[in-house]
Amino acid sequence: MRRALILVAILWPAAVLAQDVVTSSAPDSVSVSVYRAPDRDGDAAMDLDWLGGYALVTERRTVEVPAGKATIRFEGVAAGLFPESAIVTGLPSGVREKNMDADLLSPRSLYARMFGRQVILRRTVPGTGKVGEERAVIRSGADGAAILQTGAGFEAASCGGLDDELVYSEAPRDLSTRPTLSIETEAATAQKVTLSLSYLAWGFDWQSNYVVRMNADGRTADISAWVTLASSDSTSFADADAAVIAGRINREDGTRGVEPRGGELVLRCYLTPYLPASVPMPAPPPAPAMAPMAEMADVVVTAQRAMPINAPVTVRQEELGDLKLYRVPVPVTVAANAQKQVALAERKAVKMEVLYRAEVWEDSIREVRQMLRTRNRREEGLGLPLPGGPVTVFEPHGDAMLLVGEGGLDDRAEGEDVEILLGNSGQVSAVTEVVQQSARSRTIRLTVGNARPVPVRFEARIASAPATRVSAVSGRLRRENGRSVFPLLVPANGRAIIAYKLVTAD
């Protein structure tokens, strides 16, 4: 069936137009604070197909509240609103009841809600172009074929070569073109009030992204940090006061809020050559529903007003209990199904140590990975809270900067060590060999090879069973975070060897 559903006129019942229903079409101002997905590690990228974070939305609205009992409808709220989280302040007598209108006006919801009610069947006769109209009653659901009852009996619309359209003369009063929250209230006198509406909504997330550009000296780097916030909600918030919250909130949701129903109406004709169009037939079982994925728009990099065109907006850090809040200093639009980026920080000549690390379990060694390390202190060029996120690293090569690795950074407070593990190394390798063994001990030789034309720093982090002690036979051993660490300087195009002993207690 053609998806041509025509709404000729919306004849709202008289009760809807009465004074006891007030509609607020849009907020006067809005703020959006985005919290990171609770089950996502700080150094992991967002899943743009399923944003697992949420937002705290606060709106200010001016409403004419009538005397007596009234229904106030807030249009344009987030589609993923948690109704139980909504708080309304500023009403004369408080809130008696609140409801999230889950059905949006769409071809599918309109057809489904008109079951058993009269519509106009507009039929075009193929080959002639003649158009005729007759009254019909919808006798099927929104999945399968469109079964209509007319004066001639039961028919399947747009089957048997016919070209049909459905014309609706009214729409159910509780179908809205926009997500709507309604509340019931009662006031002694009519008055104009400014309300505050706050609620949580799912379908948001944010992360930090870091770009590390190593300098030619190999000991310092320039670091750019960006905050990316994303929304898969169908509602846009224009000129919003935006912020992101760093830290982990212990929040568990039984459901993901109310998902507004609606969407396209897809009706299928299942007639066979043996059945004429006028033969009554049941609607076939519905096809499996597929949840639509959020189609993310291009990233928007916002330039600050009254500043040079290349100057980015930089978020401001604020304290929020044990959390960190990063506020965007200018109003931005948190657009539906889109991402937005603003600058977090820009640091030049940050002291950066480049080294290679291998994890060793007693005498078994894993792959060698490149690593960048610094300390989050002003002396090293940083000294600010670093929310976790993906890291991209570039190195100079002639006149160009080339990508050399990608990694992740977990949340790091000021003063903490910062370690960024990159990919496996193809230039630095390490092997272990048991050179001596007895009933209670093993002596291990670890050989590190360096195919690079420059010396490299290497670390072997050795872990062992609780009853096994690690001691150095050659080389310098230190304890770090519960592990034995051997640091080495491996010469250019050369190798270095250390030895250690594993002794098992009685």
Image: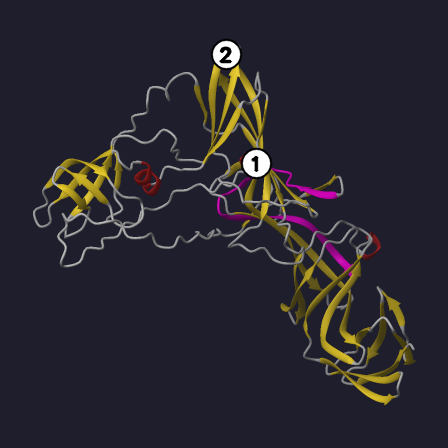
As drawn, the label of residue 190 is 2
Question: On the rendered structure, is 489 left or right of 174?
Answer: right
Quarter of the rendering occupied by the C terminus: bottom right
Category of crowding for the residue at label 1, using alpha-carbon neighbours closer than 10 angstroms: few (below 14), some (14–19), many (at least 20): many
Using the image as rendered, state which of residue 319 and residue 340 is in the foreground: 319
Of helix, strand and loop, which one carries label 1? strand
Mark pair 2, 1: CA separation: 30 Å
Q: Secondary structure at mark 2?
A: loop
Contact? badges 2 and 1 (CB < 8 Å): no
Q: Earlier in the sequence, mark 2 or mark 1?
A: 2
> Disc 1 residue type?
Ala
Crowding at mark 2 (Cα within 10 Å: few <14, some 14-19, many 20+): few
Question: Which secondary structure dominates the residues rendered in magenta?
Answer: strand
From the viewer's perspective, is 130 left or right of 168?
Answer: left
| Residue 76 visible in the current orientation | yes
Q: Is 344 a magenta residue? A: yes
Q: Is residue 154 above or below residue 372?
A: above
Q: Position of residue 364 (x, y in %)?
A: 76, 80
Please name whichever residue, 268 or 231, is drawn nearer the observer in this view of the structure. 268
